[in-house]
Amino acid sequence: MSTVLFIDSGLGGLSVWREVSRLNHGLDYLYAFDNEYFPYGEKDDSVIVERCNRIVAAVTSRHVVDLVVVACNTASTVALPSLRANFDIPIVGVVPAIKPAAQLTKTGVIGLLATPATVARKYIDDLITEYAGNCTVIRVGSSELVSIAEEKMKSGTVDKEALADCLSEFKNNPDVDTVVLGCTHFPWLRSEIEKELTSRIRCVDSGHAIARRVNSLLNGIEKGGNSVPKNSLAFMTNSKTADFSKYQAVFSRAGFVSLEELKITG
């Protein structure tokens, strides 16, 4: 049986885990989130690279891991080369769904909704040039929307006024017909986003594409195995948070059997 590790700064990567688990049955899952440094979209690149490496090192020192999913768009744009150089296991990143959005749009005007760090990357410039060169791409970077999604997952509540403010640039442009959810937190707000933007706009994300990629890679590698009991386990870098019980409830509902602190050394 294979074990897949997901890493993110918060709970958003569970949207990717959800798609992977739907397509890939019979796997064990580990989920590690760096709540001590949440959100990554507000951190320097060097900090993100260092934290991702330390998290993967900490988990793989305790568990055999067959594949790692960097379930964060911001981290994927900066940390993948370092992770792939330092760990001899497949590392899968998250790519904003600009290509499928360009294929779906009828008006040729696409919205990209991501963190401020992600929308400003040259990586995004290159994706747009390669896959959406004939489209107009309106970029909106929002760290507040990440926090709104995180709060929804923990408490079930959504600040709809704040959400509307985050989406105003798309709502006020009648030509936008497709919005890329370029942060893994945002699929958890899909229903609220689509309701706010009205039925003329569809949202796309890369979760299912990542699930297919994971499936393909796992079919081509030798599965790990050891004597350590395998279950779906969750880890966080700071368990002293007042929201610990809320985090526990989120992972319990998702089927993870435990949530514990992950000690980051170095």
Image: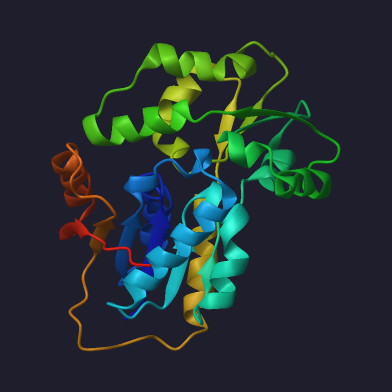
Asked if one can make out residue 211 in the rendered structure from this viewpoint, the answer is yes
Residue lying at the far front in this picture: please name it. Answer: 266
**1 left or right, relative to 216:** left
Q: How many badges with numbers are in the image?
A: 0
Can you say which quadrant of the picture contains the C terminus? bottom left
Q: Quick one: 18 or 263, which is closer to the camera?
A: 263
**131 left or right, relative to 256:** right
Q: Position of residue 196 (x, y in %)?
A: 48, 16
Q: Residue at x 42, y 23 (%)?
A: 192
**119 left or right, relative to 196:** right
Q: Where is residue 104 in the image (x, y as percent from the top left)?
A: 69, 38
Q: Which residue is drawn at 60% across and 39% down?
A: 117
Q: In this view, does 81 lie above or below 72?
A: below
Q: Quick one: 58 or 174, which is closer to the camera?
A: 58
* Residue 185: quadrant of the picture: top left
Q: In this view, does 58 lie above or below 122?
A: below
By what rule are the colours in the image chosen? rainbow
Q: Where is residue 199 in the image (x, y as percent from the top left)?
A: 54, 20
Q: Is residue 67 above or below residue 225?
A: above
Q: Position of residue 106 (x, y in %)?
A: 75, 29
Q: Is residue 220 above or below residue 22?
A: below
* Residue 11: quadrant of the picture: top left
Can you say which quadrant of the picture contains the N terminus? bottom left
